[in-house]
Amino acid sequence: MNLRALTRGDAAVAGAAVLLFIASFLPYWTVDCSGRYCGDTSQNAWDSVLFPVLPSVFLLGILAAVLILVQRFQGAAAATRQVLGLRLDQWGIAFAVTALWTSIWSLGGGPKGLDHGFGAWLAVISLLVLAGAAAAGPLVPALKAPLVTDKPAVPQGYPGGYPAPQAGQPGQYGYPAPGQDPQQAQSPAFGGQPGGYGYPAPQAGQPQDAAQQAAQHAAAQQAAHQAPAPAQAAPAPDFAPFWFAVPAPRQLAPKDNPAGAPVGDLVPGTWYLAVEQRGAALVAQLQDGTQGLLADTTGIQRG
């Protein structure tokens, strides 16, 4: 079950279905009667005398919500899957509108001395929400927003057994200590690497402006793509592991075959560990321990 596939509209559909189920047990009819011989003065939708209110209003509305949510949980694989020419969510919208229409008509008329109870009114309100959220969910941006979003979080420890920095101490492996400014962590006075992002620092007496650095970086990337695999396999001798995040989705190539099929993907909002530097490229480690070569390191954010 992939909760990240659900939207706010789906959550409204599910909540309305729960209210509809609760309403089925509440009084649907109340009898205006007083005295010792009146007997039971209320009936809910499960009483047989109210048939077919239960299947045509309550069960049909709950079935509509189930079809819509099943379609969402199946994700992109069910985008073209149809039953009698309609997708499951389209059947769900049709059932929801039908149940709403039936519930509204059931509020009219009735035998003398009978009044609609709270269950009948709650059913209409629930079906209004259910049908509205089902029909407007794919159209209204507020309802199309995902229910669960991934937020970038600062890792509490280092995978692979690397120790986490302690409070009041300089960060290790290129990661800033708690409360320490990231720029300060890269200062040589705090044990950081002045080159930044795992790249070697410029030699003393060789100042580089932004244009020169960009040109050298582009040339290094082009050389990395054109160089044979054995040349790229040589790691930088003075490299220290550090955490980083990417500004856009990027793929990892095999460590020993940059031209091979991707072995993983890097996504924004997640921290990854750079364990090795090969020219302008980095060897990154995923959460499951998979390692691959990241050739495009432009714009990465160092932790």
Image (tube, rainbow, N blue to C red):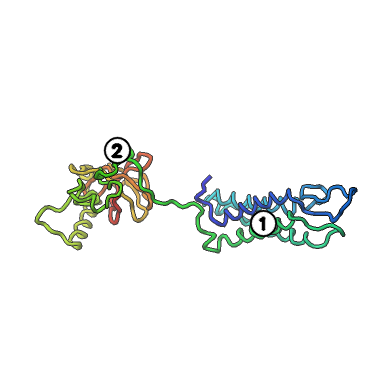
**Dot 1, how many residues are within 10 Å of its Cα: few (below 14), some (14-19), or many (20+)?**
many
Q: What residue appears at the point 20 percent right and 62 percent down from the top-left corner?
A: 210
Does the residue at mark 2 contact the one at mark 1 (Cβ under 8 Å)? Answer: no
> In the rendered structure, which amino acid carries the disc numbered 2?
Pro
- In which quarter of the view is residue 117 placed? bottom right
- In which quarter of the view is residue 112 placed? bottom right
Q: What residue appears at the point 86 percent right and 54 percent down from the top-left corner?
A: 33
Instruction: Estimate the x, y position of residue 16 in percent, counting from the top left.
Output: 64, 54
Q: Residue furthest top?
A: 161
Q: Residue furthest left?
A: 205
- Viewer can see residue 226: no
Residue 68 appears left or right of 25: left
Q: Which residue is denoted by mark 2 in the rendering?
A: 163
Vertical position of residue 193 compared to residue 113: above or below = above
Instruction: Estimate the x, y position of residue 243 in percent, counting from the top left.
Output: 30, 46
Residue 70 appears left or right of 24: left
Q: How many marks?
A: 2
Between the residue at mark 2 and the residue at mark 1, the CA separation in whole angstroms equals 53 Å
- Viewer can see residue 23: yes
Instruction: Tell me the number on the disc at residue 126.
Output: 1
Pointer 2 or 1: first along the chain: 1
